[in-house]
Image (cartoon, coloured by chain):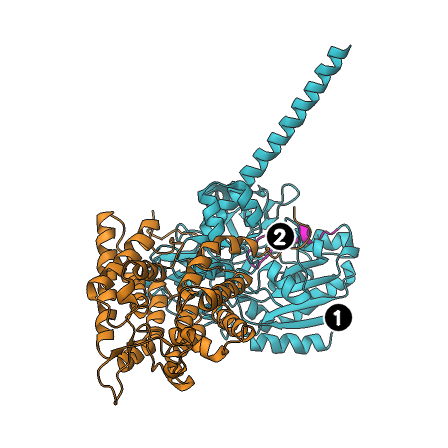
Chain colours: A cyan, B orange
Amino acid sequence: MRMGGIRVPHRKNTAQCQSVRLGVPAAVTIPMSMHIGKYARVTVSKGDTVKVGQLIGEADGFVSSNIHSSVSGTVRKIDEIMTSSGVRVPCVIIDSDGKQEKYEKLSVPEVKDFDSFVKAVKESGVVGLGGAGFPSFVKLNVHDLERVEAVIINAAECEPYITSDTRTMVEKGSYVFKGIELLKKYMGIRRFIIGIESNKTEAVRIMQSLADETEGVEIHVLPSVYPQGGEKVLIYNTVHRLIPRGGLPLDAGVIVVNVTTLAFIAEYMETGMPLVEKCITVDGSAVKEPKNVIAPIGMSIIDVAKAAGGLKCEPAKVLYGGPMMGITVPSMDEPILKNTNAVIFMDKKEAAPPKITACISCGACAAHCPFRLDPRSIARAYKLEDGAALERLGVDLCMECGCCSYVCPAHRPLVQTNKLGKQMLRRYLSAEQAKRENALKERAEKERQEKEAEK
Amino acid sequence: MSNLISSVSPHFFTKRNTRMIMLDVIIALLPAAVASVIVFGPRSLLVTGACTASCIIFEFGFEKLCRRENTIGDLSAVVTGILLAFNLTVSIPIWQAVFGSLVAIVVVKQLFGGIGQNFANPAITARIVMMVAFSGSMTNWVYPGTEKMPDAVSSATPLTAAAKGSLSMMPSYMDLFLGRHAGCIGETCALALLVGGIYLIIRRVISWHTPLVFIATVALMSFFCGKDPLYQVLSGGLMLGAIFMATDYSTTPHTRWGKVIFGVGCGLITVLIRFWGNLPEGVSFSILIMNIFTPYIDKLTRVRPLAGGAEK
């Protein structure tokens, strides 16, 4: 038994496209938040000269990440930008001098044991490059290493259009396995599973031939069914384990690492160059020439579009990431982030929203949910503001993969109602908690009074 | 400010919509429609046309009246119209057929909120209302014209014949399979209905669970009650009901086990009415009764979300 999903058009037009490094843009805008967690603290000021790889933002707090300059040049100003989620975030704008000089103080990290390994990963500034943006050092900093029975390397890349992970495996396959050796050496992990969708034949072949020479690496070729690369889906479909409600992969004895993240960690240990550029897929109906490009972090989307061969027409919608879970960007001035793996430009026709009609109760949403949730009932419970029903229906399990919205013949906004349902459930649960606490307090108070009365 | 669209993911959608699903159902009903013309002559087309047209007009009119969004484009009214006609006799007066459409669309479907909201199958409920209101014309079974008897004559349906035990009036298996016997317009040709059913299953419009379990239950129970299973399966409205009415989205369960329970329930009630009831046929009643149980069956067979650990 496997977790289900949907068959979406793959549109992997760029699978064969060797990634090309773009020219240096005139300026880059580097936000201090390209990760989940607290913003990094800016460590440079206006007028400072910076070089490639130089620290410009320092991880602040437990879950945060270092940020480095992707160009050499001068800091124009420290500003704020509005991100795609509508939040204002501090950013560093750097005018490039075009020389791309490497920061002279960079050196290959000295790694001797687990602690120095985690420290090096932290200093590289790497975050989950599959799109999540969770700081990798936090994920790898497992206190109880014995709990980790296997590391699952996520190379499914199930989103339509995106091929940047495919290119990592094809172009940097050896780094993936160097990464595996690092985890073996410093974390003592013995079992590795690489999960790849069957449509990446070249990547599968390369990974398989490398795995044949390495001990403890299994290649799982999985059906090309979206959302095969969803963390919980991948865990279930490879080691057949379920994560408890509200739990982490570690609760199922595994860690999931994106393939590009792992390859980057290995590369960093050799070069000492932190995460300053990203391989991204540029595709979509408004793009003249779909391709994979290596762009410096902070390069604006409009600059990337121009450098990658231009657009056919004015795009109607632009996405960070793929069309199933990608985030719409508010403007083309938005920068490339650490966790950007694709920029999709959609023309008017592709971006046209489908007409929403009445639910015909066909049950397709429930039939295609990987977690067997029932979005139709969730939508109803949300409408009725029934928190108890939302809890029973398990809305908190929803990973917003979008299968339900995709298959709905009435094109109901099911992911949206799931998202809203999650928020409503959180409010409901905290209200319930408060109620329980109040009841306890009242009872304690009553008992106290009774005791006093007895006296 | 840019003119880029901001929206929540996903940004890809299936091209399949309600209209395409309904179109698939209509396509699946076509073989039976063709068979009805061959068996009962061109008047069957007239009845089907009248029901379909009146269903569309009632839906359009009612939505206009209530200032609701016009939904005739989703073709669901067309499906209801054809299904209602398939449940009528070929000799039905047109005004009665139109009345049936009124019950189906306005009373059963629109008054409960329109598509997806009704708890009972519109065509089936309308048929039952008509059986009470116009019991004469609703049971004026006409035997299909043959070369020997070019004029159609009133006759008994295979189930009436079987109930009365009149062997001479009981058609052969082949006649039953091909539809050469008295009955409602669209129910007689098992072959055409099966072809339609297989099409719907291949197109994933319906799942096989309900029809198969429904028909199998009738066959098994007939066997245990000492009746001829094949004869029972091929007679009456079983095929039409099991394939096209017991698989209606809004009035039948959604879970796999729910569909199985629904099928078993329908089969049992059908057999109960056929063998021990006053009426020769019980498919419509069985589906209507099970429609009422649907929310409870769905509740009973609710699928647990796929998550590890104990329930909170």
Labels 2 and 1 share a subunit: yes
Answer with left or right where residue A209 lies relative to residue B60: right
Which image quarter: residue A430?
A: top right
Tell me: residue B155, above or below residue A292.
below
Q: Depth check: A319 or B271 in front?
A: B271
Residue A17 locus on image (x, y percent): 49, 73
Answer with left or right where residue A234 lies relative to residue B181: right
Answer with left or right where residue B128 lies relative to residue B297: left
**Residue at the disc numbered 1:** A216
* Residue in view at x 27 percent, y 61 percent: B134
Q: Residue A125 carries which label?
A: 2
Residue A405 locus on image (x, y percent): 44, 58
Q: Depth check: B192 or A310 in front?
A: B192
Which image quarter: residue A302?
A: bottom left
Tell me: residue B79, above or below residue B9.
below
Q: Which amino acid does label 1 sit on?
A: Gly
Q: What residue type is labelled 2?
A: Gly
Q: Is residue A321 visible?
A: no
Q: Depth check: A286 or A29 in front?
A: A286
Answer with left or right where residue A371 lies relative to residue B69: right
Q: Residues within 10 Å of mark 1 (few under 14, many from 20)?
A: some
Query: How would you classify the magenta stretch by its main secondary structure?
Result: loop
Name the chain under label 1.
Answer: A
Residue A416 locus on image (x, y percent): 45, 50
* Residue in view at x 33 percent, y 64 percent: B19
Q: What stretch is highlighted in magenta?
A: A126-142
